Image (tube, helix red, strand yellow):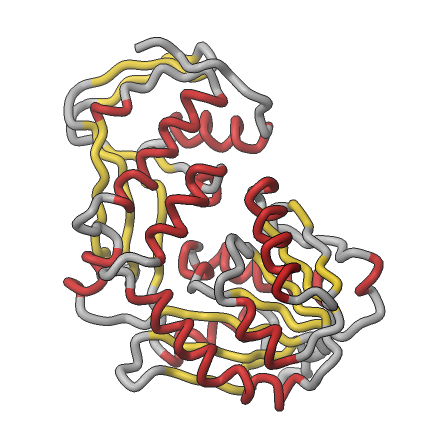
Amino acid sequence: MNAEAPQRVDPAFRDDVLAGFRLRPRAIPARWFYDRTGSELFERITALPEYYPTRVETALLARHAADVARIVGPGRAVVEFGSGSSTKTPHVLEAVQPAAYVPIDISGDFLRESAAALASDFPKLSILPVEADFMHPIVPPPEIAALPKLGFFPGSTIGNMVARTAVNLLRAMVETLGLGSMLLIGMDRVKDVDVLTRAYDDAEGVTAAFNLNLLHRINRELAGDIPVGAFRHRAIWNDNYARIEMHLEATRDVSFTIEGEPFSMAAGETIHTENSHKYGPRDARLLLRAGAWTPIAEWTDADDQFALILAEAQPPGTAP
């Protein structure tokens, strides 16, 4: 297979990919799914009949955004982490009457296009997009430095991280937003395994294309020659960790190079590309407290499939 022409490369992407292929078992962080094609495929996933989280969370936001607004009050800067297409954001913006909106996303072109589309719906709102990796503390735009802030982290994206990384991210959000800020976060619940598996392995194959796009991106940006057709998508429930795992499994023995470095995989070996952890009510609250956020309100659907939690970054207390 001929290598695709290399593009401008994010050094962190290169480092994570090469390190991930050297690992046993192999693993690549899920944040690298989101080039332009990956972002577009994920938006298609959110509209699939099997993918319940978007529908349920959007309904919760429509039903309870006014409750959120009563608690947080008007005039805050809404800072959305991993904003994507910002499809759920209008429910929040309409309800809380913010002074500014700051979408943060690693996919710059997609971010700017989504921000422009949102600006047409909210022409009087100051929209300040920030292209950045939100896994680390970010210096907010100076225009919102003095404003109280409401972080928005929908989609149960927190579930993509192992507990240690999730706690580090939540603490980074406190650094970004400041003490006294609030965070509205979506968390998916543990539920029937068949429901979960179908949500991450849809009949149309969109999630498979999303997963396999990571290999196309490696070929394109890192001068790889991975035979993408020799891999298949797998979604597996890991009950010990209460998570769905996504893997790319080699269907035959393969050899390939990435930036000139040789790699090989035997049939049946996998690349672990994503986790989606599911949280019970106590687990979710404990995770937030470990990340320096104190839960102050919670809303769930009638079937308890998904939760919206509002938390506050309070000064650390003294242990008893």
Using the image, determine if residue 50 lies above or below residue 13: below
Q: Name the one closer to the observer, 213 or 12.
A: 213
In the image, taking residue 207 as reference, residue 140 lies left or right, namely right
Image point (49%, 22%), residue name: 221
Q: Is residue 29 visible?
A: no
Coordinates of residue 262 in the picture (x, y in percent): 37, 12
Q: Quadrant of the N terminus?
A: top left
Image point (61%, 73%), residue name: 93
Q: Is residue 178 visible?
A: yes
Using the image, determine if residue 60 lies above or below residue 117: below
Q: Quadrant of the C terminus?
A: bottom right
Q: Name the one closer to the observer, 143 or 165.
A: 143
Coordinates of residue 13 in the picture (x, y in percent): 53, 32
Coordinates of residue 60 in the picture (x, y in percent): 42, 79
**The image quarter in which residue 140 lies:** bottom right
In the image, taking residue 94 as reference, residue 307 lies left or right, namely left
Image point (47%, 75%), residue name: 286
Q: Name the one closer to the observer, 240 or 207.
A: 207
Image point (34%, 76%), residue name: 280
Coordinates of residue 283 in the picture (x, y in percent): 40, 74
Q: Name the one closer to the observer, 24 or 174.
A: 174
